[in-house]
Amino acid sequence: MRSMKNEKILLSAGIDTRTNDVAFRILDLSGSLCKAGVTSDAEVFPAIKINGKYVHVLSMCINGSQLIAPETADGNRYFKDQIESGNLVTIETNMGPVLNFKGAPPTDLRTKLLASKNAM
């Protein structure tokens, strides 16, 4: 899902290898915090607010794009619940403007992600 105000920031979904459940991440393709072609290890990032609730997150650079994901299982669950509700998801960071995402992922998202994870 793309941010309603910034097309270079989107939500991506994948399988959390710890729980084998769907986990969502923020992907910033703007290159504003990661240099082109740079990949880095995950590091603690300032907490973000998701629908008014602070969540601890980790950040890493992957080929110049920034990936931000909740640090804890509780944070992952809360973020997932907010996205899957279909209501407006508002994300605030200390780095810039508020991000808004609207819409719900497909109901069979987990099945599709597991199928791609187990692809030959």
Image: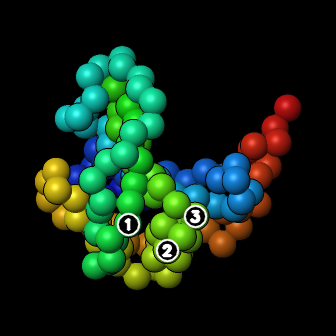
User: If you read the primary sequence from the N terminus, does the residue marked by circle 3 or circle 2 appear first?
Assistant: 3
Please tell me whether mark 2 sits on a helix, a strand or a loop: helix
Instruction: Please name the amino acid that badge 2 sits on.
Output: Tyr
Q: Position of residue 117 (x, y in %)?
A: 75, 43
Examine the rendered structure and indicate whether residue 39 appears above or below residue 43. Answer: above
**Disc on res. 73:** 3
Quick check: can you spot residue 11? no
Marks 2,1: beta carbons within 8 A: yes
Examine the rendered structure and indicate whether residue 91 appears above or below residue 69. Answer: below
Q: Position of residue 1 (x, y in %)?
A: 43, 58
Left or right of 24, for residue 18: right
Quick check: can you spot residue 7? yes
Q: Position of residue 85 (x, y in %)?
A: 50, 81
Marks 3,2: beta carbons within 8 A: no
Q: How is the image coloured?
A: rainbow
Left or right of 20, for residue 44: left
Dot 1 corresponds to which residue?
55
Cα–Cα gap, marks 1 and 3:
11 Å
Instruction: Please name the amino acid that badge 3 sits on.
Output: Ala
Please tell me whether mark 1 sits on a helix, a strand or a loop: strand
Quarter of the figure with the C terminus: top right
Dot 2 corresponds to which residue?
78
Left or right of 103, for residue 15: right
